[in-house]
Amino acid sequence: MNIERNVSLKKYNTFGIESSAEYFVSVNSVAQLKEVLSKNEEPLFILGGGSNMLLTKDIKGLVLHLNITGIELSNKTDSHVEITCMAGENWHKFVLYCIENNYGGLENLSLIPGNVGTSPIQNIGAYGVELKDTFVRCNAVEISTGKEFIFNKAECNFGYRSSIFKTSEKGKFIITSVTFLLTTKNHNQSISYGAIKTQLDKQHITTPTVKDISNAVIAIRQSKLPDPALLGNSGSFFKNPVIDAETFRNFKTKFPEAPYYEVTNTTFKIPAGWLIEQAGFKGKRYGDAGVHKNQALVLVNYGNATGEEIWNLAMKIQKKVRENFGIFIEPEVNVF
């Protein structure tokens, strides 16, 4: 292991924000991770795929880049397989590995940026499917002691883009691997959410395979979302707000044309992208910080925006949406 000083983090975050790490180390195994934790006396910053973060300043202390890779199968039956993926694996590449082997359950989560290790933290989700639907357990190392722990689904307390790793246990653990239970046949497909069925109909596919669904999701996402390699972004910047029944009634009275999804009998989800677009921000640019022209939920860096400029734009959007609709939209992205 080699601890470096004053390392640029621009290539380590999908926003492409220029930020500097006072100290930087990349670990390739759990043993290396434990060694670093046992010796480190600096403030610690954990870096995975850099996809769900906005850097607004230089990072003091030690930036620990988690680069532990590998995939392992276990408990394979006639209908299911348990698959454990190490935290440093790229999420989309892992999903494609599952698709290639006809393992079902993750196809709707294709093309989500980031690494596997961060996926349970915010319970990533897309097109009617969430990580918790196939999650079995995750292994993690406690930062303060270096001890290894195993968390099952119940212990993770998953919510909408949330888990204990984002709430009560935030900053206390480093996830080193995640185990999923996937189907090998009779896949439980979810194609009714969003534009998946429309995309499949365009291709005259009536009995889709997991690969067909994955390809449909990829096509939809590519048509709406910019490639971070070409235009800096972190995917969806805001969560879709979930509001109570009374707020929903008032909202729909004023805005009857607004789309929504019924979560329960008393809670309703409103697309944040619709709120932002109606507030007039879609396609707007403020210097090198802007809102994507095809998807108002995505904030972008046109080249040299600072993290502070992106965050100022986000707060401007928050304020306007609240003024116009009486609804608060919460960032999905972690801001540092």
Image (cartoon, rainbow, N blue to C red):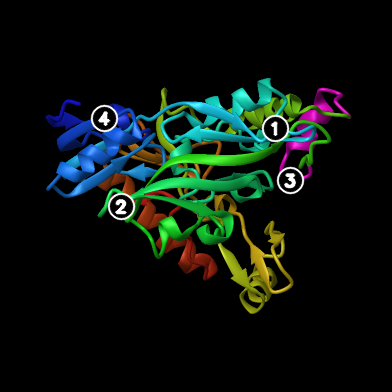
Q: Which residue is the site of mark 2?
A: 312
* As drawn, 255 above or below 99: below
The secondary structure type at the circle numbered 2 is: helix
Question: Which dot, 3 or 2, sits closer to the camera?
Answer: 3
| Distance from Cα at disc 4 to Cα at disc 3 | 39 Å
SS class, disc 1: loop
Residue 59 shows in the view: no
Q: Residue furthest bottom?
A: 246
Q: Which residue is mark 4?
A: 26
Tag 2: Cα neighbours inside 10 Å, few (<14), some, or many (≥20)? few
Q: Amino acid at mark 4?
A: Ser
The residue beneath circle 1 is 76
Q: Nearer the viewer, residue 21 or 86?
A: 86
Between disc 2 and disc 4, the foreground one is 4
Quarter of the image where the N terminus is located:
top left
The reply to whether discs 3 and 2 touch (Cβ–Cβ < 8 Å) is no
Q: Residue at x 21, y 39 (%)?
A: 36
Decide: few, some or many residues near mark 4? Use Cα within 10 Å; few <14, some 14-19, many ≥20: some
User: Mark 4 or mark 3, which has the lower sequence index?
Assistant: 4
Q: Residues within 10 Å of mark 1 (few under 14, many from 20)?
A: some
Q: Which residues are magenta?
A: 192-206
Distance from label 1 to label 2 (Cα)? 49 Å
Q: Is residue 221 above or below residue 56?
A: above
In the rendered structure, which amino acid carries the disc numbered 2? Asn
The percent coordinates of residue 55 (x first, y second) are 27, 43
Residue 46 part of the magenta segment:
no
Q: Which residue is mark 3?
A: 193
Instruction: Please name the amino acid that badge 1 sits on.
Output: Lys
